[in-house]
């Protein structure tokens, strides 16, 4: 009988927990703090899905990539190799050629990835409750449409290609929906309620999070070498450069509530 009473008590404690608490724990399991909310359904601005430029190399492209003396991960260069064809004939056995394909950012190596959940403030909801006799409820409502852009922390050659490679690595490490930019639409709302005590002023600040990605990019001059019917990729004048980037988290806001006594 005593065991049954203990089980019954535990059951009552579990079912008495609000559903939102379980949802917050689920977000915590993903590494997202419970004050950071997904607004993909509520956002009045439909952000386009940011397609990460993964590319499956063709048979020829993979064959060439395997011969390179430096790892090549740049999706744009892989796309060009995918669109290329090399057909052999009797003259190919005596053909010697070195074809310059240009200088490219070849690969990006991630060294540090972190998330700033309060990267950029995009909204403030405010209520003055100093003259009231009861607490006032306040909720998040986006007052103006806001766009948050990411970007590299320094000027670097082929910046667009480098930024995409960095976004791929950051998304893999964080598991977050990253984008080069994100928009919070006017009128976007969430149901979470915050109470402003009597004789106080309440502020609900909203932020867009962003991943901070740091690492180094490898550059090199790429040549297609054809000799004796065999083909390969050779990379010359290889250099490396350190770089960082801020990459916004799409359709998420961090909500921070504060209340305080203030003189009129």
Image (spheres, rainbow, N blue to C red):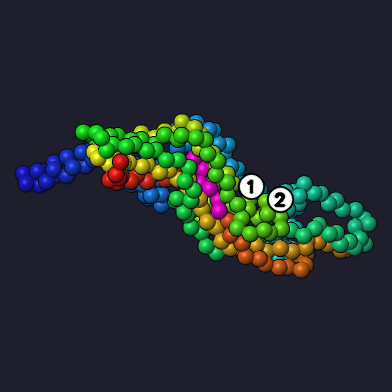
- Tell me where residue 240 sits by quadrant: bottom right
- Tell me where residue 18 sits by quadrant: top left
Count the numbered circles shown: 2
The answer to whether residue 174 is left or right of residue 235 is: left
- Tell me where residue 155 sits by quadrant: bottom right
Span of residues in magenta: 246-251
Decide: is 163 above or below 7: below
Helix, strand or loop at mark 1:
loop
The answer to whether mark 2 and mark 1 are in CB contact below 8 A is: yes
- Viewer-nearest residue: 118 or 32: 118
The answer to whether residue 231 is left or right of residue 62 is: right
Say whether residue 252 is visible.
Answer: no
- Viewer-nearest residue: 261 or 193: 261
User: In the rendered image, which residue does mark 2 sit on?
Assistant: 76
The answer to whether residue 152 is left or right of residue 192 is: right
Helix, strand or loop at mark 2:
helix
The answer to whether residue 46 is left or right of residue 81 is: left
Q: Quadrant of the C terminus?
A: top left
Q: Quadrant of the N terminus?
A: top left
Q: Give percent across and percent down for residue 239.
A: 71, 68
User: In the rendered image, which residue does mark 1 sit on?
Assistant: 53
- Viewer-nearest residue: 223 or 210: 210
């Amino acid at each position: 009988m005593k065991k049954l009473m203990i089980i019954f008590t535990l059951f009552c404690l579990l079912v008495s927990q609000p559903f939102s608490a379980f949802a917050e724990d689920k977000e915590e399991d993903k590494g997202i703090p419970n004050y950071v909310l997904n607004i993909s359904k509520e956002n009045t601005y439909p952000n386009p899905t940011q397609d990460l430029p993964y590319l499956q190399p063709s048979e020829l492209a993979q064959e060439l990539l395997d011969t390179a003396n430096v790892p090549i991960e740049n999706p744009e260069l892989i796309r060009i190799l995918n669109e290329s064809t090399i057909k052999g004939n009797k003259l190919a056995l005596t053909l010697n050629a070195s074809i310059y394909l240009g200088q490219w950012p070849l690969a990006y190596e991630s060294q540090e990835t972190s998330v700033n959940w309060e990267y950029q403030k995009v909204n403030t909801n405010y209520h003055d409750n100093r003259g009231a006799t009861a607490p006032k409820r306040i909720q998040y409502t986006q007052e103006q449409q806001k766009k948050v852009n990411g970007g590299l922390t320094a000027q670097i050659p082929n910046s667009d290609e480098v930024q995409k490679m960095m976004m791929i690595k950051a998304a893999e490490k964080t598991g977050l929906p990253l984008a080069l930019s994100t928009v919070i639409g006017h009128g976007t709302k969430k149901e979470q309620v915050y109470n402003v005590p009597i004789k106080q002023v309440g502020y609900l600040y909203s932020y867009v999070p962003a991943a901070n990605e740091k690492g180094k990019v490898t550059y090199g001059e790429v040549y297609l070498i054809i000799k004796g019917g065999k083909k390969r990729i050779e990379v010359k004048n290889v250099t490396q450069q350190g770089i960082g980037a801020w990459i916004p988290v799409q359709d998420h806001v961090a909500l921070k509530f504060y209340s305080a006594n203030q003189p009129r």
